[in-house]
Amino acid sequence: TQLLEQSPQFLSIQEGENLTVYCNSSSVFSSLQWYRQEPGEGPVLLVTVVTGGEVKKLKRLTFQFGDARKDSSLHITAAQPGDTGLYLCAGSSGTYKYIFGTGTRLKVLA
Amino acid sequence: KAGVTQTPRYLIKTRGQQVTLSCSPISGHRSVSWYQQTPGQGLQFLFEYFSETQRNKGNFPGRFSGRQFSNSRSEMNVSTLELGDSALYLCASSPWQGSHTIYFGEGSWLTVV
């Protein structure tokens, strides 16, 4: 069974701080996605990474796919209250269905 | 363009009843996936439909079923509801099967009492 473990589960930081969220698995994924979900809404796709070692940047967010395509990280620079939400990673092994991670709940305090 | 539309947004059902949830994907999208989200289990894949055919299925009992119509709209049905079926049911829309471009709807909140 493929599992995606995210850490930390909960994170509460002050505005302006940096943070990193990790997504780890013992399985290899052909692609990995990161989502942000706010209360009462569905997840919103932030990025898709498909190549081992790939790094993508989205404004203050930096996403990295591990060389072996088993893990990924999301780094947020100078966090803002608007970054608050549930961050989810999701991996696909090529069967067209995504396995979602356990989630990291981030709260950025003003 | 309009996003993914799910109806109803909120509903309360009694144990043993059945429920049907509806999803209208983004115009032009032909793949629809369904997920169940609970605090304990997180987001779990239910099934995916493409061109009116179920292409993938998650590890859920046969009480959970779905279908897709020729206009790509999809419905999912849960029969003989159990308390543990209380969850947020999310529909995701993609242009085609296997596309990395995925848009989620706001979900249908189901409470079973």
Image (tube, rainbow, N blue to C red):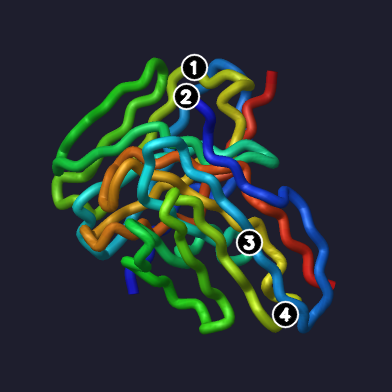
For mark 2, does the 10 Å Cα neighbourhood hold few (<14), some (14 to 19), or many (20 or more) residues? some
Provide residue B98's location: percent of width, then percent of height.
26, 51
For mark 1, does the 10 Å Cα neighbourhood hold few (<14), some (14 to 19), or many (20 or more) residues? some
Disc 3 element:
strand
Provide residue B87's location: percent of width, then percent of height.
67, 62
The chain under label 4 reads: B
Q: Are marks 4 and 3 in contact (CB under 8 Å)?
A: no
Have a look at marks 1 and 3 and say if they share a chain: no
- N-terminal of the two: label 4 or label 3? 3
Number of the label disc, if any, that sits on residue B82: 4
What amino acid is found at the position of numbered circle 1 in the picture? Ala
Q: Which of the two discs, 4 and 2, sits closer to the camera?
A: 4
Q: Are marks 1 and 2 in contact (CB under 8 Å)?
A: yes
- N-terminal of the two: label 1 or label 2? 2
Residue at image point 59% right, 58% down: B37
Q: Is residue A12 above or below residue B86?
A: above
Report the residue marked by disc 1. A78
Q: Is residue B79 above or below residue B92?
A: below
Q: Which of the two discs, 4 and 3, sits closer to the camera?
A: 4
Report the residue marked by disc 3. B38
Residue at image point 77% right, 78% down: B17
How far apart are labels 4 and 2 at the CA level?
A: 43 Å
Have a look at marks 1 and 2 and say if they share a chain: yes
What amino acid is found at the position of numbered circle 3 in the picture? Thr
How far apart are labels 1 and 3 at the CA level?
A: 31 Å
